[in-house]
Amino acid sequence: MTLSYLIWNGSPEIFSIGTFSLRWYGLLFALGFLLSQQILYYMFAKEGKPDKDVDTLTIYMIVATLIGARMGHIIFYEPATIWTDPLSIFLPFEFSPFRFTGFQGLASHGGAIGILFALWLYSRKKKPGQNYLQILDRIVILVCLTGALIRMGNFFNSEIIGRPTDSALGVVFINRVTDAIMRDDNNPVDEISVVKNNELPKRTNGRVPILIYLFFKPGTSREVVNSTVDKSRSYLINPALSEYVDESPLGTLDFLIAEEKPGVTVAKIRTLGIARHPAQLYESISCFILFAFLFWYWSKYKVNLPEGRIFGFFMILLWSLRFAYEYLKEPQESFENSLPLFMGQILSIPLILVGIFILIRSYRKHKNENQ
């Protein structure tokens, strides 16, 4: 029978050289700003605004997003880091052993606050046709596009995952497990493949049968194969990876070893993956749609756009969606389980209220100006 779930085993890295690695997340993050800058050039040209202001705005946006998102994650989710490991807040690498990590842990609510503050600073220059709300109306369109690409990067990283689901939309994020197996020193495994186990039925709460194939390098002895398979079980029962696979810590590993061809051994491990809502993709697709809607709305008015209109729509729609999606996501930190709402929902409420206020103000002001 056919089982309806997707197995995601893509690598978060594009390539690595020594301790440096280029990851899809970083590439998509940068691509978001690059595309946004080009679109902003187009928008400014259509409205007769100087191109040089785009470069200034881009710098404001990049700095504000990185600092705001990073500080937001630390303050809202890991405040103890300020005292226990303050250097890790803004250093994109680890010392022991030394390796480049990038900025791990960015909060969208913190990024939003950082952007709002940075654009307020920019607006103090009081350039014609660029007051605070007018700037926000244009920038939030690009925030949607960048946000969509960043969430796509989260998917590659298998982070911000959803709750287990038995629906056809479920995704088994298995690449963290296969990466752990492949990163062993002197690893005899040449390749890993993960497929659905169609011989067994799905279980409840997203538990689905999968097969992990370990293809060993030619000439690997059976003794090494056996020890590697046994060691692989330590990853399947590792609490740090329990969000991705469900292997009983008391049972024996169910596996079969056979020779694919003379001198080449393959081990077939039977285990349970956990199919989860791909919450990152939900948010990414929503952001792409919101970007298209807001860009279309801007194109109707351009320089005559009612002040605050797009910003109001953005704040209401984006953060309402974020509030709803939190019900499908796993909490980022354990303390959230004791809260009446998840932290992402608590932080979204005031932003939604700001959007409602700005939108009402926009319609009232536009109505009064046309009386």
Image (cartoon, rainbow, N blue to C red):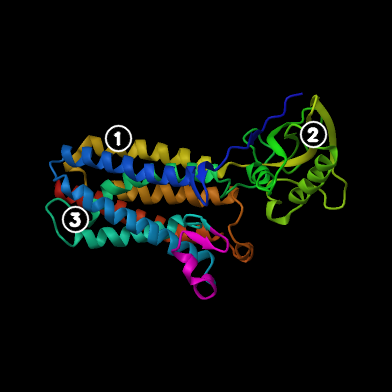
Task: Label 2: state its secondary structure.
Answer: strand
Q: CA distance from mark 1 to mark 3?
A: 22 Å
The residue segment tinted magenta is 81-98
- Is residue 91 within the magenta segment? yes
Q: CA distance from mark 1 to mark 2?
A: 52 Å
**Residue 238, position as x, y percentages in the image:** 74, 54
Of circles 1 and 2, the one toward us is 2
200 left or right of 8 in image: right
Q: Which residue is at the front of the view, 298 or 84?
A: 84
Who's the residue at 31% across and 50% down the image? 311
Task: Label 3: state its secondary structure.
Answer: loop
Considering only order in the chain, which callout, 2 or 1, is on the residue closer to the N terminus?
A: 2
**Residue 329, position as x, y percentages in the image:** 59, 50
Name the residue beneath numbered marker 1: 296
Name the residue beneath numbered marker 2: 268
The answer to whether mark 2 and mark 3 are in CB contact below 8 A is no
Given the image, on which type of amino acid does mark 2 rest? Lys
- In the picture, the disc for residue 124 is none
Task: Label 1: state its secondary structure.
Answer: helix
